[in-house]
Amino acid sequence: MSTLEIRNLHASIGGTEILRGIDLTISSGEVHAIMGPNGSGKSTLSHVVMGRPGYTVTAGSITLDGVDMLSLAPWERAKAGLFLAMQYPTEVPGVSLQSAMAEAFRASGRESDSVVAALEAEADRIGFERKFLERPLNVDLSGGEKKRNETIQLGVLGPKIAILDELDSGLDVDALHDCSTRIEAMTTEDNLGVLAITHYNRLLKQLRADRVHIMVKGRIVASGGPELAAELEVDGYARFQGSDDPSRLDPLGDVDPFADPLV
Amino acid sequence: MTQAILPSFVHANDPEWLNAARRLARERIQDIGLPTAEEEEWRYSRIDDLDLSDFTPVEAKSEHSPMWGLVDGEAIADAVATIDVVDGFVVAVDVSADVEDLVEISTDGVGAEDALGSVMTEPTDSFADMSLVLADRPIVIRIAPDAVVEGPIVVRHRVVTAGSLTATRIVVIAGQNSEATVIEAQSCDEIQAVILPVTELRVERAARLKYLVVQDLAHSVWQIGTQVSTIDADAHLVTSAVALGGYYARLRCDTRMIGKGAEGDIKAVFFGQDAQALDFRTFQTHVAPHTNSDLVFKGALDGHARSIYTGLIRIEKDAYAVEAFQTNRNIKLSEHAWAESVPNLEIENNDVQCSHASAVGPIDADQQFYLESRGVPTQVAERLVVQGFFSEIVSQMPHAGVAAAVDAELTRRLQTSEFVR
């Protein structure tokens, strides 16, 4: 049983505060979703948790099983059991998926010889052509192939907690099904904990999300069960907009967000 | 000064035409003198620090059999001919019986008159002239018309004499519709020396020549190298240069597309460490229409190393329907490293597609983060990113054995480099 705890996390970029006090607890086997309007800080959260350079954490803590993540380099966080599936996976010319995974295995004391078999098994499982395994990472891959590639790495590395930053963007229906089915299986078979950032309920249904959090302007303004995501599909974020204080939730009550404001 | 560096050095038994050419070259050096860093083509170079009076020409062949450099053994196991050159003197020529009718190698100067200077019709600078004065008889490699030579022809150079000033003149002539690979491997002992290699590549009509030059010289030597090529109609030249050594190692690389349909692919990788300076001056000259050239030079610099790249694409008036590209990218692995990149275009015809790109910067932070986020340790991620950066060139080098040797050597250097310490 592992737990990722984010407490009162404040982070800024270039002096602008993006995260303004995030609290989240994700444990093994759980699927949490973060939804929120563009620019609310969802991707920033994923990057800060993984330790991407350029962000400054000004307050708060991130721990995995009690171990401080903020003091670790990104690769050490990965080794500790975190994984980030990126919204826009970076192209790394000349570096194959296989060699990157072999180095990751080596760094965590695992047998790097087993990487090829593990990659092939994962590729077959989600319908990713094996020929792509030898290609330079993400180079000349379509949006969907990149996401399958991220999912393969998630399967091969077997982290404790995975953050999925808009895994469903750029994915067609079939690819989304293949990737989310695989990840959902990890949450039950391998007890993977998931924090999924998304705009769409479809992914959450397929991942069978347990909890849904709404993020607005760097704060979690509402949390609930899967019904919250379903509600958003209908009503949008309007009732959460401008409510960066959770105590002011639901100021608009039953007002139709699509109603003509001039009437 | 030129008196001092060119002593009464007489190649007594050489053909009269060759000694006459040397006399003219010597006179030109006397008139013009040596270049200085004030000249555009030598800007940023270390040329002003070179004192040739510290170095002496070698007048006789060395007796001891040398070690060869990086490109040896397995890397060139498929060689069909080897020419061994020590201190500028040919010490052995070995041509496999399979290619005797396809490849002619002349080292005695006989019949070399039409070859030497047939590509470098004007000396590029005083060092090209100096190479003529100093070098033994030219090495002329002729590929017979229509010949397809399967394995590489390898010239192994080694400089073993401390304090020496040596030169070689090589001419490769790929006859009409022939196909061949030529590899030059340049290395030396851990000595101080000045080395002036000049190679002319003449790619005749519809010929396909692949040429690789790998220098892994000691970090204490000066090398001022020149490579000039002409590519005739429908011919294709692929060149691949690897520069790893030298205190100051310069490669001037002139490629002239002189026949309709000529194509030139000009690639290089370099890796500078410590206090090395690596200097590249390229000229892509399109004389004929419907010609293409694509140049990519990529390098990484560690420690206090420096690199200079200046390149000129020149499209002459009659050269229409031309595509010419030029790219120079440099990664600075250390904050003390320094790179200068100056691309230039000179176009006299409107019907052309040209581009040039240059970049100097640190390791790509996004690539680095991506790999780290998978659990690849920082230093390994840096090495992988740089290897990946090189691999665009190395993986496409036109000889697999050399590519493997270069890849292994770059990996070794990256693993022991300062930035990953």
Image (spheres, coloured by chain):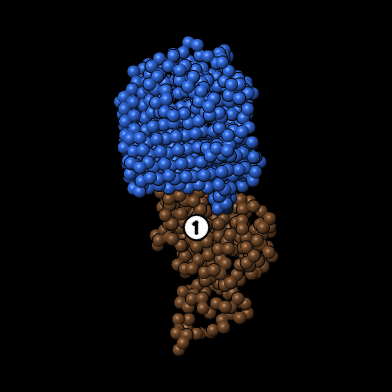
Chain colours: A brown, B blue
Above-or-below relation of B186 to A171 = above
Q: Nearer the viewer, residue B327 or A215?
A: B327
Image coordinates for residue A257, horizontal then vertical, percent:
48, 81
Image coordinates for residue B209, horizontal then vertical, percent:
38, 30
- Could you say whether the residue bearing mark 1 is in a helix, strand or loop? loop
Q: Point out the image quarter for the N terminus of chain B.
A: top right
Q: Nearer the viewer, residue B75 or A175?
A: B75
Image coordinates for residue A135, horizontal then vertical, percent:
45, 45
Q: Point out the image quarter for the C terminus of chain B.
A: top right
Above-or-below relation of B287 to A71 = above
Q: Nearer the viewer, residue B99 or B408?
A: B99
Residue shown at the point (34%, 32%) measured from the top left: B232
| Location of residue A211 (image quadrant) | bottom right
Q: Chain of mark 1?
A: A
Q: Nearer the viewer, residue B231 or A149?
A: B231
* Residue positioned most to the front: B31
Residue shown at the point (40%, 14%) measured from the top left: B110
Q: Which residue is denoted by mark 1 in the rendering?
A: A88
**In the figure, is residue A166 to the left or right of B144?**
right
| Location of residue B286 (image quadrant) | top left
Type of amino acid at the residue the image marks with label 1: Tyr
Residue shown at the point (68%, 64%) measured from the top left: A58
Image coordinates for residue B12, horizontal then vertical, percent:
50, 11
